[in-house]
Image (cartoon, rainbow, N blue to C red):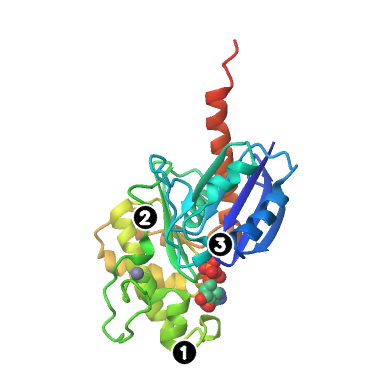
């Protein structure tokens, strides 16, 4: 059984075919151009591949409320050409199969939940720290949605007392993304994160802000696993710093073994690495396919 997965990002679209076990069999990457050229590439890739369903994770914001007219649209993105674009509609026009859509970070969370670091658990918090910061939350086996979808990148974090950076978020300046995203690091230190030495103060500050986000996630959602991915988290030395700071921030209030004794396996890098999103897309496709079968294939005795 073959399924399709799309990770639609601001700079690239990753398309893949995989099987029911979430194993990727074929993958191709297209540059994100205007919607028409990009979607032509995507549609050509999936044509005649005999996929049973498609799972899509996209940059946003997205309208994911099925009761709204613009369900399946990319809405107010700063990427002008993609503003108000009916992504799901375009795919439905081309493929008469079940199609699931969610945010890029939500499908990465789903990928790690089904196949990766949180496999076998019932919840997880997956945060990506890259060009932006975002998080997907799985609670009681389900990705959390609501009015929109969570926008964890824009939570407020207390400013570190020696920090005098004003933050780069165009909406709030000093939110988590404004302080701790890859571009925020670059702006604050006038140097790309990849070039900053491991013993630079940058990383203490970075782990301070990320630890606040993680601690708030622990307090708000009580996830069984915290997974931190994205370009910035390739700095492996951030992990011990973040773990230490989380313990400090939580102040011995949450007395569970995962935090008090096993925090090294509680706050982790994604097991699927850069494939978290694309594997999550496959998981979403499989989910949609099962839903469709339940509705459409009569039960035979
Ligand atoms: P995107 O978020 O655009 O999908 P990434 O997750 O790779 O892509 O994030 C890109 C951002 O992360 C850039 O700001 C980049 O400078 C930063 N970044 C990428 N790799 C590293 C690294 N190894 N160390 C520090 N920062 C990094
Ligand atoms: Zn913000």
Residue at the (52%, 55%) spot, across then down = 58
Q: Nearer the viewer, residue 202 or 164?
A: 164
Label 3 crowd bin: few (<14), some (14–19), many (20+), radius 10 Å = some
Label 1 crowd bin: few (<14), some (14–19), many (20+), radius 10 Å = few
Disc 3 on helix, strand or loop? loop
Asked if ligand 1 lies within 8 A of label 3, the reply is yes
Residue at the (32%, 68%) spot, across then down = 212
| Quadrant (top left/top right/bottom left/bottom right) for the N terminus | top right
Q: Distance between the residues labelled 1 and 2?
A: 30 Å
Q: Is residue 168 above or below residue 282?
A: below
Residue at the (26%, 73%) spot, across then down = 158
Disc 2 on helix, strand or loop? loop
Numbered label attached to residue 190: 1
Q: Which of marks 3 and 1 is in front?
A: 3
Numbered label attached to residue 150: 2
| Quadrant (top left/top right/bottom left/bottom right) for the C terminus | top right
């Amino acid at each position: 059984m073959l399924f399709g997965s799309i990770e639609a990002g601001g700079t690239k679209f990753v398309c893949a075919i995989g099987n029911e076990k979430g194993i990727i069999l074929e993958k191709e990457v297209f540059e994100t151009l205007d919607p028409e050229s990009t979607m032509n590439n995507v549609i050509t890739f999936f044509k005649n591949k005999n996929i049973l369903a498609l799972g899509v994770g996209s940059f946003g914001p997205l309208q994911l409320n099925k009761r709204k007219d613009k369900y399946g649209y990319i809405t107010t993105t700063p990427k002008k050409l993609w503003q108000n674009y009916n992504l799901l509609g375009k795919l439905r026009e081309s493929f008469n199969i079940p199609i699931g859509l969610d945010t890029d970070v939500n499908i990465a969370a789903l990928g790690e939940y089904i196949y990766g670091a949180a496999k076998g658990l019932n919840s997880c918090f997956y945060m990506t720290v890259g060009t932006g910061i975002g998080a997907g939350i799985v609670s009681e086996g389900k990705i959390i949605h609501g009015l929109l979808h969570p926008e964890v990148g824009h939570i407020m974090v207390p400013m570190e007392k020696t920090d005098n950076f004003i933050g780069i978020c165009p909406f709030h300046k000093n939110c988590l993304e404004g302080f701790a995203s890859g571009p925020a690091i670059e702006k604050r230190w006038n140097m790309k994160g990849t070039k900053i030495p491991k013993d630079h103060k940058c990383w203490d500050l970075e782990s301070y802000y990320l630890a606040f986000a993680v601690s708030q996630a622990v307090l708000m959602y009580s996830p069984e696993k915290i997974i931190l991915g994205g370009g910035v988290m390739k700095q492996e030395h951030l992990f011990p710093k973040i773990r230490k700071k989380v313990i400090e921030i939580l102040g011995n209030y949450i007395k569970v073994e995962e935090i008090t004794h096993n925090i090294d396996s509680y706050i982790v890098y994604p097991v699927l690495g850069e494939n978290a999103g694309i594997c999550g897309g496959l998981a979403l496709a499989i989910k949609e396919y099962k839903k469709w079968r339940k509705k459409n294939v009569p039960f035979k005795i």
